[in-house]
Amino acid sequence: MSDENLDESVSHHPLENRPRRSTAFRPHLGQRDSVQLFLHDKQFPVKTKITLSDVSLDEKGVRILAENQAWKEVLKICEKCLQLGSAPHELLQYRLSQTISLLRLHLHTFAQQNIDSLGDLNNNSVYFYEFYSNLYKQKKGNMVPFSLLLIKAVVPHFCGSDVQDDPNQPSSEDNKQTSGTNIALDRLYKLLQICGSNLKDGGALSNNRHHPPQEPIDEEQEAIWKVRQSRVILFIINCHISSKQYSLAIELLEKFTEKNSNFTETNPEQFIVLISMLGCLYLQCGMLPFAEKCFQRAQSTASAVANPHVNVTCRLRLNAGYLKFSMGRYADAIKDFEAVLQLDPFNVQAANNRGICYLYSKDLISAINSIEEFIRRDPTKTLDETIVYNLSTMYDLESENSAVKKKTIMTMIGRYCGDDFPTSAVKL
């Protein structure tokens, strides 16, 4: 899904109120030695630090840096390319990459300022091909990438605090400070209307009042706009969830799932993902019978698929584990999560929830050992924000002297992860 995926894990439970258990603490051996001790002397490739000087000053260079998670360097190359100048549509791509980098580095306010400086992306004539008729002779319409429109809509949500609805206009009663999430939802719903207006049937959430596009639309364009609409809907659902508006999130996801019920035949794996997401959302609200029905529907859909992908099998076992966890059957849930890890050794949700199950079974040592064992498999793949946060919390529960262990985790993050990893998860 997007820059902010729907959290389908059931692992976000408060750990701070759990009783502490003191254990023996190993002496500090130095950061380098402590990492090797943690990894049992296994060797893994240290992440190569690629810089601006290693790539060409163009979109290819931006892509290489982004693939290597060198987001600080992406900021530098985009600034260079913007200064050098280029075709208008390429400049917009650099702005898009620049904004994504700021979001990945958790510099949300700067991302907001960067994208607001572009002004009205929908109606400003400078963003239309016709404005550059000598350069784009055969093209018409708005050249702004849809991803940039989507990010502009959702950025206020990441800022969190009160922001101005339109920073390019003076403050007034119609342009007042309001919740960032509310602004994001307002913009996302408007973007959803744009998506629907470009679909013959209005798409996933259409009603009887929908009017098809005035200009003919081919199948390829129809498919593109359906994907765009799905992205917007998932962002809206995430915003509702983060605002604890669970009933609105459920209502929207129910409509979206039912509208795409034909996926059971045309794209069953995608339908299994959607119905499983709905089931997980029901679990978040404590609606276990509804969640169980969703998971059963996912199971029946999968049973009609010949040779289902391993991701489908993992999804079904995760569903079973989530349901058993919610019922307090922690030992049974652990078996499901371990079955997933047998199929997918680097599945973060399974490893994280297995550790939480041990914790809720009052076995703190096994909880810590299970997560440490998962990280040890390959820290280039297993160091995840939620995993690190929960392990750090468990270290605090285990001993008053948890700082050395957490510094070891911090050293591994610097060695094996990109520069967008939120080090606050280590809780030092």
Image (spheres, rainbow, N blue to C red):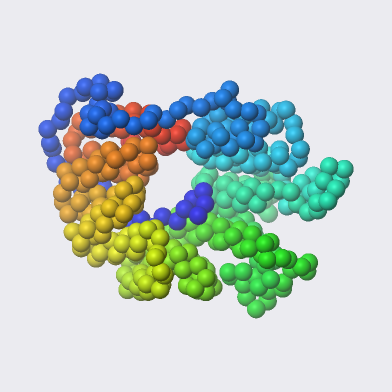
Q: Name the spot of residue 260 as percent of width and height, x first.
A: 53, 71
Residue lying at the far right of the rendered structure: 134
What's the residue at 69%, 41% (across, down)? 92
Task: Say whether residue 337 is left or right of residue 383.
Answer: left
Q: Name the spot of residue 210 as percent of width and height, x first.
A: 68, 74
Nearer to us in this view, 87 or 142: 87
Nearer to us in this view, 26 or 154: 26
Nearer to us in this view, 303 or 93: 303
What's the residue at 37%, 30% (across, down)? 45
What's the residue at 63%, 63% (across, down)? 223
Task: Say whether residue 164 is left or right of residue 412.
Answer: right
Residue lying at the far bottom of the rendered structure: 208
Q: How many marks?
A: 0
Residue lying at the far front of the rendered structure: 307
* Picture layout, residue 328 above or below residue 89: below
What's the residue at 24%, 41% (across, down)? 373
Q: Name the spot of residue 128 as percent of width and height, x first.
A: 79, 49
Res 276 visible: no
Nearer to us in this view, 182 or 402: 402
Q: Name the spot of residue 72 as percent of width and height, x first.
A: 53, 30
Task: Say whether residue 39 is left or right of residue 265.
Answer: left
Res 279 visible: yes
Q: Quadrant of the C terminus?
A: top left
